Amino acid sequence: MSQFKNGICGCCSDISTCCITYFLPCVTAGKNAEHVNKNCCLYGFLGITCVGPITRAIIRSKVREKYNIEGSCCGDFICHLFCPLCALVQESREAQANGAPGPLSMARE
């Protein structure tokens, strides 16, 4: 098991992902969901509702599973409850580090 390549507080090191996530978190949530083969529109929308921390934790768990990153569902939920934007950026950067399109790309994998 490994760790995330980027720390939870390193969200400002990639300014384009950081800005998109800050102003349009549903876009980053949708891209993260699509990267783990979930419905990008559904998870992007649900991410901005009251069930957002739960749905985003599900996606975070899938990202961890896909890249063999250690952690727990409880930790994923807590992370998205208290630091949702930083967590979204961290997941997006992990996907990019593993070959996913960048934040400004409209291309599918």
Image: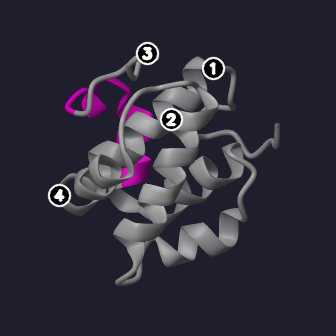
Q: Which mark is residue 98?
A: 1
- Residue type, numbered disc 4: Phe
The residue wearing badge 4 is 82
| Direction from residue 17 to residue 95 in the image, left or right | right
Along the line of sight, which residue is nearer the eye, 58 or 8? Answer: 58
The residue wearing badge 3 is 2
- Residue type, numbered disc 1: Asn
What colouring does the structure picture have? one colour
**Spatial distance from mark 2 to mark 3, Cα to Cα?**
9 Å
The residue wearing badge 2 is 64
Foreground label between 4 and 2: 2
Q: Which of the two labelled residues, at mark 4 and mark 2, occupies the earlier sequence position?
A: 2
Q: Position of residue 29 (x, y in %)?
A: 51, 57
Q: Secondary structure at mark 2?
A: helix
Q: Which of the two labelled residues, at mark 1 and mark 4, occupies the earlier sequence position?
A: 4
Q: Position of residue 88 (x, y in %)?
A: 40, 47
| Direction from residue 80 to residue 1 in the image, left or right | right
- The residue sitting at 23% across, 56% down in the picture is 78
Q: Name the main secondary structure of what is drawn in magenta.
A: helix
Q: Which mark is residue 66?
A: none
Circle 1/circle 4 CB separation < 8 Å: no
Extreme bottom residue here? 50
- The residue sitting at 40% across, 82% down in the picture is 49
Q: Position of residue 93 (x, y in %)?
A: 48, 29
The stretch in magenta equals: 9-21
Q: Which of the two labelled residues, at mark 2 and mark 3, occupies the earlier sequence position?
A: 3
Q: Secondary structure at mark 4?
A: helix
